[in-house]
């Protein structure tokens, strides 16, 4: 097999595995799944220029293509596992395959509550079961009970990062925020938590992104949801806490890039501008229909400290919302943990020590204890 064909096939498999991971978190009509199926289809189309059909044989966790096993890799192993769970031992793909047919395949791989025998009827996809095991599966909804794995969560974070960037760009131009998009991101994360994502994976910051604001928004959202769920918060309040975290820094969209992305410390003049982002953000959100009040409050209060130092200035009887306190903790932790042009990330134990020192002065003591308890559970997990 030529090297180019191998790469093309590995890419097709990677797209399909990612589409399955996304389909478990979103609905099957999600545009991201469609895009991934289209990308996989293009890879198969390239492979089918030199052959009329291609056959993938799945044997004990391995994929054989034209009699050669594919080199071991995360995606090929996952693909083989998905196929075996649905009792497919060979898949034959013929020229003319379209992305809708791959969408049917993704649906079949995800809908594990449907019988394995009812395979998708597609003109250009054929399935064979070589070894028939008539014994009923021990758990018919095996996949539904499986926790979401690292890949699925990473796909969700990356996808959400892109969605948040899109929503913020629209906001910059149109001055309105599309609540449906934000709801989708938060719901995806809440679903992931409800499916018992290992907390460590959920709390690991997204590092590979260059647009810090969006990466930070996603990280703070996950940290806020984790804190709130650890406190037993559910339902509409939990949802609003997630939305508030995504939007807490929205006021930064109007801070000049030379300040926002400055690879060094800000001077006093620049700080004056930077300190305006909570008020600007809250004002802008006030004009956006559908934005929860909590998001407006949090945007305004997230740089206020527990002892009411910080900014913007407020009167001394000011009472901060619980969500603002949680966002301040998440915000501080993410800033410490994230690599920036002018600083290296700090190790998790040092970050925890800093939070501990700040508790009771700058950070809410009980909520910081809750956060540290969460971190402890994560770091001591097997
Ligand atoms: Fe901020
Ligand atoms: Fe922030």
Image (spheres, rainbow, N blue to C red):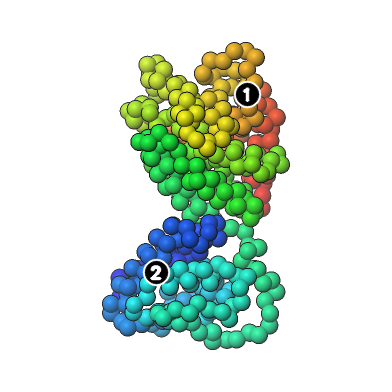
State the image coordinates of residue 189 (x, y, percent, origin top left): 57, 48
Q: Quadrant of residue 258?
A: top left
Q: Is residue 268 above or below residue 247?
A: above
* CA neighbours of label 1 inside 10 A, class few (<14), some (14 to 19), many (20+): some
Q: Quadrant of residue 37?
A: bottom left
Q: Say if disc 1 is inside 8 Å of ligand 1.
A: no
Q: Is residue 22 left or right of residue 307?
A: left
Marks 2/1: CA–CA distance: 51 Å
Residue 104 appearing in the image: yes
Image quarter of the N terminus: bottom left
Q: Say if disc 2 is inside 8 Å of ligand 2.
A: no
* CA neighbours of label 2 inside 10 A, class few (<14), some (14 to 19), many (20+): some
Q: Nearer the viewer, residue 382 or 152?
A: 152
Q: Is residue 282 left or right of residue 96?
A: right
Q: Is residue 40 left or right of residue 108?
A: left
State the image coordinates of residue 378 (x, y, percent, origin top left): 64, 46
Residue in the image at 51% along x and 18% along y: 312
Residue 48, numbered label: none
Residue of label 1? 320
State the image coordinates of residue 27 (x, y, percent, origin top left): 53, 59
Residue of label 2? 99
| Lower position in the chain sequence, tag 2 or tag 1 | 2
Question: Regarding mark 1 in the picture, which secondary structure is present there?
Answer: loop
Q: Is residue 29 left or right of residue 341?
A: right
Residue in the image at 66% along x and 44% along y: 235
Question: What residue occupies the far left of the structure in this picture?
Answer: 49
Question: Regarding mark 2 in the picture, which secondary structure is present there?
Answer: helix
Residue in the image at 34% along x and 30% along y: 257
Residue in the image at 57% along x and 86% along y: 131
State the image coordinates of residue 353 (x, y, percent, origin top left): 61, 31
């Amino acid at each position: 097999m030529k090297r180019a064909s191998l790469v093309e096939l590995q890419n097709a498999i990677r797209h399909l595995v990612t589409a399955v991971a996304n389909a478990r978190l979103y609905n099957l009509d999600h545009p991201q799944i469609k895009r991934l199926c289209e990308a996989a289809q293009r890879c198969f189309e390239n492979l089918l220029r030199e052959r009329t059909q291609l056959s993938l044989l799945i044997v004990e966790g391995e994929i054989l293509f034209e009699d050669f096993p594919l080199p071991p890799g995360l995606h090929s192993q996952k693909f083989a596992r998905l196929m075996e769970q649905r009792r497919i031992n060979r898949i034959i793909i013929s020229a003319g395959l379209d992305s809708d047919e791959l969408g049917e395949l993704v649906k079949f791989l995800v809908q594990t509550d449907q019988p394995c025998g009812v395979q998708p009827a597609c003109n250009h996809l054929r399935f064979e079961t070589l070894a028939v095991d008539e014994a009923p599966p021990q758990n018919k909804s095996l996949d539904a009970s499986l926790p979401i794995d690292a890949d699925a969560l990473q796909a969700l974070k990356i996808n959400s990062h892109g969605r948040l960037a899109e929503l913020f760009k629209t906001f910059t131009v149109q001055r309105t925020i599309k609540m449906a998009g934000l709801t989708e991101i938060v719901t995806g994360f809440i679903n992931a938590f409800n499916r018992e994502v290992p907390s460590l994976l959920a709390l690991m910051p997204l590092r590979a992104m260059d647009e810090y604001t969006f990466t930070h928004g996603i990280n703070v959202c996950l940290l806020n949801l984790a804190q709130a769920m650890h406190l037993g918060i559910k339902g509409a309040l939990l949802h609003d806490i997630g939305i508030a975290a995504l939007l807490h820094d929205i006021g930064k969209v109007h801070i000049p890039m030379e300040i926002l992305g400055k690879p060094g410390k800000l001077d006093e003049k620049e700080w004056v501008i930077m300190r305006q982002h909570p008020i600007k953000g809250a004002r802008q959100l006030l004009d956006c229909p559908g934005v929860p009040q909590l998001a407006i409050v949090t945007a305004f209060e997230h740089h206020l400290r527990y002892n009411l130092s910080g900014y913007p200035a407020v009167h001394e009887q000011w009472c901060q919302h619980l969500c603002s306190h949680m966002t301040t903790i998440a915000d501080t932790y993410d800033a410490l943990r994230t690599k920036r042009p002018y600083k290296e990330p700090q190790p998790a134990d040092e970050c925890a020590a800093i939070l501990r020192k700040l508790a009771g002065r700058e950070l809410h003591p009980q909520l910081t204890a809750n956060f540290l308890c969460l971190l402890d559970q994560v770091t001591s997990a097997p």
